[in-house]
Image: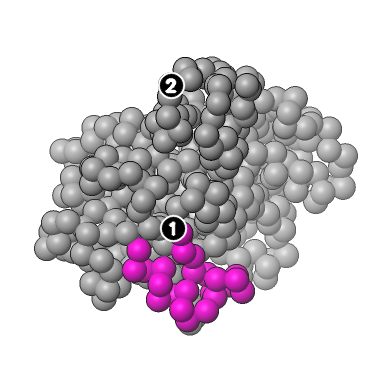
Amino acid sequence: MKIVADENIPLLDEFFSDICQSNLITLAGRDMCQADLVDADILLVRSITQVNEALLKGTNIKFVGTCTIGTDHLDMDYLQAKNIRFSNAPGCNAQAVVEYVLSSLITLGERKQVNWRALSVGVVGAGNVGGLLYKTLKALQVNVHAYDPNVAKFASEDHSTTVWQQDVVSLHTPITQEGDNKTLHLVNTDRLNSMKENACIINSCRGAVVDNAALSKHLESHPEFMAVMDVWEDEPAPNDYLIKQCLLATPHIAGYSLDGKYLGTAMIYEAVCEFLALPIRMKLPQLVPQGSLRKISTGHEAKMPFILNKVIRSGYDVRDDHFRMLSLLGLDDHKKAQAFDVLRKQYPLRRDLNTLTLSAKRLSQPDWLSAVGVKIKP
């Protein structure tokens, strides 16, 4: 049994070495080619590897696993036609993406000089990620609306109109290129013009959901409009001008918490075991280390909005990634693409908020902290 895997998937040896008897080959995901897979049985990838006929033709691949939520990088028709089993990891990094959006909202509130929880939010796409974001914002008493044509609760025409009229619109859809509900360039010139002139759009799903050229022109002509961009049409070498136009620009890392990446690998490991009819010998809790920041304490005088903001930023501060992203400015496309991938490959250790415990007295809204996953110790 031979497994070829993206070198940036964590815990490969821990989960898969027994299955393949040390015949595990790791490669740069963006550079994988057909010759690498000729005698392989299983392929494990992330979103940067296009899995299609050009990659798989003439190989012995019987199973493809992607340690990501999305599957738009997989040619599903080809896999099904060749009877190649596949699996993804839906929801594995949902908590991390929610924390990315919350951290972005804090920064947006500071820029606008308002309490971010007073901003209304529209969530486009209410699946694993968008659904969790909606639930979290509701628990934080934010005025939040959602639209998803595939989720009955949020599928009405009223939802589809209202969601775009909020102060902030956060995108959480897959990329689909045809059909009534296609999401390719879902956010285009007309859509942008229909939004509030001082709105903010957050894209942490797929780059092509937003027409990047249209967004750049809109930001140029609407100085009060803002954008938070984690994904880009021209990855891994996004446009310098658009980067500089954004309130926050980051290198496709919204879901890059250690917990999210570990869970993605664990989910694919279990799918491989099921495919091979093998027992599941490894469990994720055996492998997850303790977080480097485990406890925070506050004084009795601390107010709840202050505590909430500090706790969210203790778990994840989007500004750190924004300033790392600015290091790409001025590079030619080749060097920028290399640097973009390095930012992702050498990403600093980040843990989800559910690894954090807060020690505090007389909290006025302890449910706010529970909503973001923080444990409370009186």
Could you say whether the residue bearing mark 1 is in a helix, strand or loop? loop
Classed neighbour count for the residue bearing mark 1: other residues with Cα under 10 Å, few (<14), some (14–19), many (≥20) = some
Q: Is residue 195 above or below residue 117?
A: below
Magenta residues, start to end: 144-166
Rounded to the nearest angstrom, the CA distance separating label 2 from label 1 is 27 Å
Residue 74 image point, x, y percent: 56, 59
The structure residue drawn at horizontal position 76% and vertical position 43%, both measured from the top left corner, is 270
Residue 340 image point, x, y percent: 33, 38
In the rendered structure, which disc, 2 or 1, sits on the residue that comes first in sequence? Answer: 1
Give the left or right position of residue 9, taking residue 109 as reference.
Answer: right
Residue 222 image point, x, y percent: 14, 61
Q: What residue type is labelled 2?
A: Glu
Which quadrant of the view contains residue 177?
bottom left
Please check the rendered image and state whether residue 65 is part of the magenta-colored stretch, yes or no.
Answer: no
Give the left or right position of residue 321, taking residue 330 as reference.
Answer: right
Q: Which of 69 and 219 is in front in this view?
A: 219
According to the picture, the residue beneath numbered tag 1 turns out to be 143
Q: Which amino acid does label 1 sit on?
A: Asn
The structure residue drawn at horizontal position 80% and vertical position 51%, both measured from the top left corner, is 275
The structure residue drawn at horizontal position 49% and vertical position 65%, both measured from the top left corner, is 146
According to the picture, the residue beneath numbered tag 2 turns out to be 301
* Residue 215 visible to the viewer: yes
Residue 121 image point, x, y percent: 40, 58
The C terminus: image quadrant: top right
Looking at the rendered structure, the number of numbered marks drawn on it comes to 2
Q: Nearer the viewer, mark 2 or mark 1?
A: 2
The structure residue drawn at horizontal position 38% and vertical position 58%, both measured from the top left corner, is 120
Residues tagged 2 and 1 counted as in contact (Cβ below 8 A): no
Q: Nearer the viewer, residue 222 or 334?
A: 222
Please check the rendered image and state whether residue 160 is part of the magenta-colored stretch, yes or no.
Answer: yes
The N terminus: image quadrant: top right
Q: Which of 51 and 182 is in front in this view?
A: 182
